[in-house]
Amino acid sequence: MFDDMRSFIQRLDEMGQLKKVEGADCDLEIGTINELMAERKGPALLFDKVKGYPEGYRIATGLILTRLRQKISLGIPEELSDAEAVNYWREKSTKYKPVPPVEVKSGPVMENVIKGEEIDILRFPVPKWHEMDGGRYVGTGVVVITRDPDEGWLNCGTYRIMVQDSKTLAFYASVGKHAAIMREKNWAKGVNCPVVMSFGQEPLLFIGSTLPLPWGMSEFDFAGYMKGKPIEVIKGPITGLPIPATAEIVIEGFSPPPAVDARSEGPFGEWTGYYASGARTEPVVHIEAIYHRNDPILYGKPPIKPPINSWYPIPIDKVAVFWDELEKTGMPGIKGVWVHGPGNRIIAAISIRQMYLGHAKQVANLAASLLHGGACAGRYIIVVDDDIDPTNLEEVLWAVTTRCDPDTSIDIVRGFLSSPLDPMLSPAKRAVRDFTTSKVIINACRPYHWIKEFPPVNIAGNELRKKVMDRWGHLFT
C-alpha cells in the first residue's frame, strides 16, 4: 500500500501508466487534455512547468480513472474481475475494526509553512477545468476534514472547492452531507467551523473520503484499517484538526456562518454531465495557513461528461456499502447487487431468488431507501431474477424489456433527497430549496404467482455447454 500520493504516481510511472506533460496552461488547457485522455482511457497525467508557474509545482490527474489503476490504488489483485474486486473489498470491509490515526510530530507536508500576508492559494497552478466554470477549482481531488462539535468524531469528505481570492475558498457541500451538518452545528453554537483541506494525499484516504460511510464512522479509522496501519497525522497548529503528514498541499482555516461571509460559487461542470447547479451563494473558508511539500503536486479529479466515469470505473464506492446495508436488514434471497450510470449511483440492479409473493417489491423498496447520498442517487431501482447478472446492464435491460409489465410492475415514489447538482430540479424547486426527487421502482422478475408457467429461456443448459466445450473448446482459444 502507498503512504503518499507521489509513491503511487511513481508506481504508475514504472508500469508505463503515466505520461508527463510540460508547458500546458492551467486556464482550460490542462482540463481539456485530461478530458481527451480520459475519453481514450489513456494513462494518468503529471503536468509540470505549467505556464506561468515555477518548475516543480505540478498537477496530477487521471490517477484512478481505469480499472487497473483503481485496483493498484486499493491493493486489490489486478487479475480479479469487477465483481470479484467488489467482493474482495466487501469481504475485507465486513471485518472492519477501527484503526485510528496516529499523531506524529512532523512530516513532509510541513516542509513549507506559509502564514499571514504570504498566504496565496494561487501560488499553486489551480486550473479552470471546464469552459463554463465560474472560476478556478483547487478542490476536486480534495479531502476536507471536519469534526463534529458534539460527538467529537472526525469526518473526511470530498467536496468541490473554488478559489474566491488568495486567502478565501468557497466551501460547497450538498444538503445532508456530513461536513454540511457539522458546519451548521458549529454555527449554531456561535463559532466558526474549523476546517482542514488536503489537496493531494495517499490513495486510500482520498478513496475513503468518497465512500458513503455511516454517521459516526471516521474515514481516518476506515482507511487505516484497509491499509493495515494507522494514517499518520500532525495536529493542526491553528485548528487542532489532524493534518495528513504525507499530504502534498494542505490549508487550515475557518468557515464563518453565511451571515458573516458567503460568496458566489459555481457554475461547475459536474459528474452528471451538466452545469446543473449554476452559481449560488455558498459558505467560504478563510485560510489561516498553507502547508506544502517541496515540489508539491495538486491532485485534480475534475468531473467528465458521461459515459466517462470520473469517479471509479469499478463501483466499489457504492456497491460494497449498499450490498452490506441490504443484507443487514435480514432480507433473504439477495444474490447480487450492482450500480450503473454516472457517479456510480443512479441505476441499481439487484438480483434475487424469489421466495414468496411480493418479495421483489419488498427488496426494491428497501433498496430505494438505502441507496442515497447525492444527486440522482437510486433514481432507478431494478430487481431481477437470479439468472440475470446485475453487473451486465445489457442483461438487466433484457429482463426489463421482457419480464416487466409497465402497467403493473413499475412504481414511482416521491420525496427522496437529491441535491442541487440534479439537472432535473426545476427552477421553481430550486428557488425554494426543494432538493427532492422521485425514484422509479421496476420489478423485472418473472411474475411470482405464475413463475412456473413463465416461458423458458432460450439458452443451452450448463450440462450441454460443458459437453460441447469438452469437445470443441479449442475453437475458443
Image: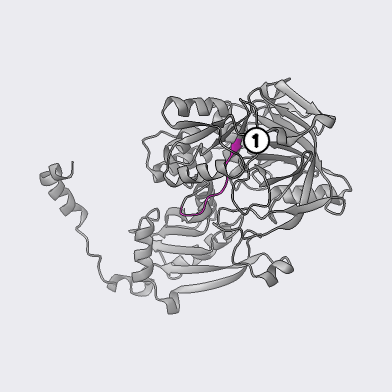
Which quadrant would residue 117 be assigned to in this image? top right
Q: Position of residue 447 (x, y in %)?
A: 37, 72
- Judge from the rendering whether residue 132 lies leftward or rightward of residue 390; answer left or right: right
Q: Is residue 11 magenta?
A: no
Q: Residue at x 70, y 58 (%)?
A: 279
Question: Viewer-proximal residue, 300 or 53?
Answer: 53
Q: Residue furthest left?
A: 471
Disc 1: which residue: 125
Q: Position of residue 415 (x, y in %)?
A: 63, 69
Is residue 154 visible to us here? no
Q: Tell me: residue 4, above or below residue 207.
A: above
Q: Residues within 10 Å of mark 1 (few under 14, many from 20)?
A: many
Q: Tell me: residue 97, above or below residue 346.
A: above
Q: Which residues are magenta?
A: 299-307
Which quadrant would residue 285 be assigned to in this image? top right
Identify the image's colour scheme: rainbow, by chain, secondary structure or one colour: one colour
Is residue 325 visible to us here? yes
Q: Tell me: residue 263, above or below residue 438.
A: above
Q: Main secondary structure of the magenta part?
A: loop
Q: Residue at x 42, y 37 (%)?
A: 68
- Judge from the rendering whether residue 168 lies leftward or rightward of residue 189; answer left or right: left
Q: Is residue 302 magenta?
A: yes
Q: Residue at x 67, y 24 (%)?
A: 293
Question: Viewer-proximal residue, 396 or 422?
Answer: 422
Q: Tag 1: residue type?
A: Pro
Q: Position of residue 198 (x, y in %)?
A: 67, 35
Question: Viewer-proximal residue, 397 or 62?
Answer: 62
Q: Position of residue 143 (x, y in %)?
A: 65, 39
Q: Tell me: residue 475, above or below residue 335.
A: above
Q: Residue furthest right?
A: 190
